[in-house]
């Protein structure tokens, strides 16, 4: 697993915990639904700005997203 895969899994998991669909997360973050899907499948590599938009939409801080992704890599 690489950081891109770990980050995508993190987004998918937190989105699921918040009971959001990809479409709902896309709308809340002002991103395209296909872009959210690409992040979750590790096809898209989000910028820091996109990470910030996702964090705000998921109501977490950016460092939380990165920490959870890093924790996946450390296992």
Image (cartoon, rainbow, N blue to C red):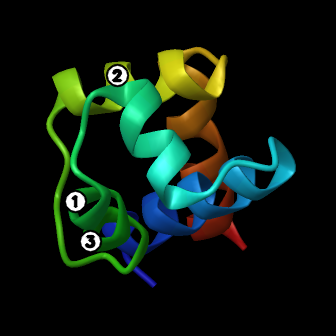
Q: Quadrant of residue 10?
A: bottom right
Q: Residue 56 location, x and y as percent? A: 50, 15
| 14, above or below 53, in the image | below
Which residue occupies 46% across, 57% down? 7
**Disc 3 element:** helix
Badge 2 is on which residue? 53
Q: Earlier in the sequence, mark 2 or mark 3?
A: 3
Whole-percent x, y for residue 11 in the image = 55, 53
- In three-dimensional space, the C-alpha distance between marks 1 and 2, rounded to whole angstroms, equals 12 Å
Count of all numbered marks drawn on residues in the image: 3
Question: Could you tell me which secondary element the residue under label 1 belongs to?
Answer: helix
Specify which label sits upstream in the sequence, 1 or 2. 1
* Residue ID for mark 3: 38
Q: Residue at x 17, y 66 (%)?
A: 44
Instruction: Give the camera-side residue of 57 and 61.
Output: 57
Within 10 Å of disc 2 (Cα), the crowding (few <14, some 14-19, many 20+) is: some
Q: Quadrant of the C terminus?
A: bottom right
């Amino acid at each position: 697993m690489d950081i891109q895969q770990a980050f995508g899994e993190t987004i998918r998991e937190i989105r699921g915990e918040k009971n959001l669909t990809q479409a709902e997360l896309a709308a809340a973050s002002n991103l395209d639904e296909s872009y959210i899907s690409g992040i979750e499948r590790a096809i898209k590599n989000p910028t820091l700005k996109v990470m910030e938009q996702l964090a705000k939409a998921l109501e977490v801080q950016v460092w939380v997203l990165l920490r959870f992704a890093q924790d996946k890599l450390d296992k």
